[in-house]
Amino acid sequence: MPIIREGTDQIPAFETVPISFEVVSRVDICALVERGVVLEVPTEHYWKDYDSHWDETPTGLANRYDLRDWGIFACIVDGVRVGGIIIAPKTSGYEVLAGHPNAAIIVDIRILPKVRGTGIGRDLVEEARNWAIGSGHTEILVETQDTNVAACRFYSRLGFVIHSVETEGYGPAIKEAQLIWRLPLGVMV
């Protein structure tokens, strides 16, 4: 798939690809931590939309951080934006990178729903991996939640391993576990 690097001026276009999904199950945290296996357990059904929290959208992040050194990539097929990924280097105030001086973090990855599962996500992560290696990073981190089983399976297939689990990583009001995945950059995706 054709992947292009974009500037911060394309953030509004980046956000046109939806990032919502239906939650129907959760990752079994014990199986993940103890055996590194992504198993799912049923849960109540609801829609999750990461863009519903404006301050966490790419536009919101651009208002909080200096994105000039971030990698912003898009996949555009026949003039249609079908996916994108944003990867950040060590950034002041970006807490997930604390304790990881040579890490980059995938801040956002999104694929148009009708083309999910076609390899676009893998191509985007490979582009982010190449960017991170070229920028001198030794590992990539990515954050997701136990309610995003598809993302957990995706990262696991690409060689990411679970780094940390915070069962109340978002406070007691949000009933989701925060999962941080890690990819040492010697690993091929």
Image (cartoon, rainbow, N blue to C red):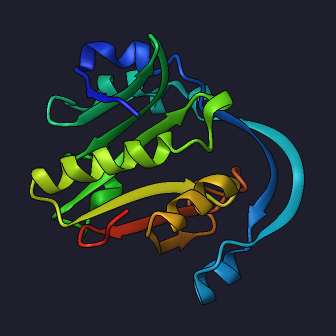
Q: Is residue 51 left or right of residue 75?
A: right
Residue 5 visible within the image = yes
In the picture shown, does residue 114 fall above or below 70? above
Query: Residue at the location (35% across, 67% down)?
Result: 183
Q: Is residue 86 left or right of residue 53?
A: left
Residue 173, horizontal then vertical, whole percent: 71, 50
Residues 173 and 100: in front is 100
Residues 64 and 7: in front is 7
Residue 163, horizontal then vertical, whole percent: 44, 74
Residue 90 visible within the image = no
Which quadrant of the rendered structure holds the N terminus? Answer: top left
Residue 6, horizontal then vertical, whole percent: 25, 22
In the picture shown, does residue 83 fall above or below 124? above
Which quadrant of the rendered structure holds the C terminus? Answer: bottom left
Query: Residue at the location (38% across, 68% down)?
Result: 182
Residues 13 and 89: in front is 13
Query: Residue at the location (29% across, 46% down)?
Result: 128
Query: Residue at the location (69% across, 82% down)?
Result: 31
Residues 20 and 160: in front is 160
Residue 181 sits in quarter: bottom left
Residue 116, horizontal then vertical, whole percent: 62, 38
Name, please, the residue furthest toward the bottom.
Answer: 34
- How many labels sit on residues? 0
